[in-house]
Amino acid sequence: MARTSAAPSFVLRPQAEPSSPAVQGEPRPFLPGPLLAAKALWLCRIRWGAVAILAVFGIMGLVANGWEPLGLLLHDDWPLIMAAGLAAANVAFTMHARSLVRSRAEHGAGLNISIQMGLDLVAHTFVVHFLGSIETYALFIYLFHIVLACIIFDGRRSLAVAVAACVLYAACFTLEAAGVVSPVSVYAGSAGAGYVHRATSTAILNMASAMAIWLGTWYVASYMSAMVRERDLKLAETNRRLVAVQKERTRHLLRTTHELKAPFAAIHANTQLLLKGHCGELAEKAHAIVLRIAARSRRLTREIQAMLQLANLRSEAEDAPLEELDLGALIEESMAHVEPMAMERRVSVEYNPCSLRIRSVRGHLRMLLDNLLSNAVSYSHEGGDVFIECKRAAGAGPTVTIEDHGIGIPEHKLPLIFNEHYRTNEAARFNKESSGLGLTIVKHIAQQHGIGMRVESRVGEGTTFVLQIPRSSCVDGYSRKREEGAHGLSHGG
Amino acid sequence: MAYLMVVDDDEDFANAAATVLREAGHEVDIHLEVETATDGMEQRRPDLVVLDVMFPEDSTAGFTLARTMRHYNDELKGIPILMLTAVNMKMPLGFSENDIDDHWLPVSDFVEKPVDFDVLKSKVAALLKRAASGAPSEKAQ
């Protein structure tokens, strides 16, 4: 039959390339809203300093002509008026900025900062006029806001601030030159009443020089700021990707574990059906074969699990979340985990309990203890015993001792037991289900957490693992330093 | 004895588990998908649900079904749930009996895969006994 309509389809598109870094001068985004709000609040705090300086200036000016011997002509009116005006405006800016910080608003902070800068530039122009637009270095106050604008704003907006500074200063100069306002200076000098006369060409040259310095400063500051901001954005993007990768890795690990273990669960389930007679009595030879299938299936499951654990440990970020743990309770959990195997092999596990609180990663510590205890039980003779002790000497971290009286390890093979997939011949003969990864996992976790480990063993007499947990892990006021405690592994016999 | 529902996308495992549970005297229905299991539960209320965690389209579908039964369906909230999982405490991201709570993991007990069928039978029996005695469908002691 002919198709009457197109079949539903899905097109896999290539992944979009990340956007290339913008070139300097192109519009760049503002900083994030909450960060801008914090900067607005910071500007307000600095302004209080300017208000204080103006107020002091005004108060000094109240001493009338007391500063003339020092060559200064101070006034009380304009500084105090400006201080009061700036203070009132600053209160309003501060309240607005605080509300933005509290609400973590994405918008509004940019406008707040823009108005602050605009008001400051106008105020600066008045200060420059009253201090002396040419005679003093007051005109370089504008540099402060030009540099600040380069840090906070993008290239165009910061250039607008620099141009605004030039325009305001030029307006001040022009009004003074045209006689609309009389040039003033805070220096007494030959100015008499403080009015200054200057040559026009000199004044224009001076103004042009100042503007050149401002614009040059803008260029350098905006370029440097752009570089820093670019790096910040890249870091933020990298961080975002790392978090996404971590999530994906977690999801992948869970899914992989399930997908690899599930088929073996089905094999195990069906071998149980056969072995337990749910499908009728099996011939002896068939029973033996099915037993082997079940054993290899179990072994493969454990190997897959161990490989996934090791892969996860190796790829995990170093700073897995720490939590406060009861070491004694953790050991008891581990004992419960190996209890079925211990019962099956009639191995008794004795434990000298302790109650010590430490800060560590629960999952890691459990893996470490599970592996060591499993080995102790696995390599014990039937009817044997395993002894666990946990104690803490004064001035030291806790020590955990796991001792078995099983097959033991030849002395010359002790340095090799932590190697990946290494099993002694004796171990392989005794326990065919070992993956050879358990002690590699133990070693990785011990090194990651600064846990020292000593192994003592004699063939035919058993093996003892002694773990030295760093004192810094104890929950009793010691500072956390992962470098404290014994490092590495030592072997004894 | 009791009417059980096995909800697991692995047909081989589900059939094996159902065989064992039937031989223990229970009536067992299998559902390979969470959606059909929900419909089935509403048509006939099971006495206990054996529930896997991960399903092909949703790796947390088992959790979602357990929470739906406990929090959003008065008919089903009291049914004991025995959860099956291949991701256990040996994996840093796995979970254990300590994680069972009324909100995140509202199940009665869980069994790690590969499943020992003797363990499965004994846990099913214990949960059915608890339910019959009127105890709440919380974590089995």
Image: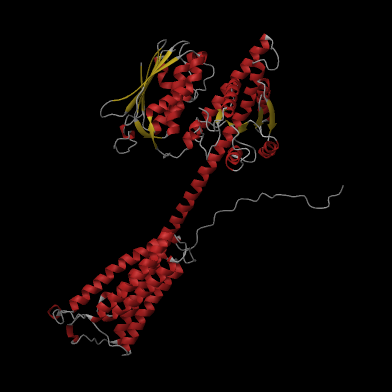
x and y percentages locating residue A308 in the rendered image: 53, 31
x and y percentages locating residue B127 in the rendered image: 57, 27
x and y percentages locating residue B51 in the rendered image: 61, 33
Closest to the observer: A148 or A284? Answer: A284
Q: Quadrant of residue B8?
A: top right
Closest to the observer: A41 or A189? Answer: A41
Q: Quadrant of residue A300?
A: top right
Instruction: Determine if residue A424 is in view.
Output: no
Residue farthest right in this picture: A1
A279 versus A206 height, above or below: above
Residue farthest left in this picture: A69
Residue drawn at x 83%, y 50% as measured from the top left: A3
A133 versus B39 height, above or below: below
Residue drawn at x 67%, y 15% as measured from the top left: A277
x and y percentages locating residue A6 in the rendered image: 78, 52
Residue drawn at x 63%, y 39% as measured from the top left: B75
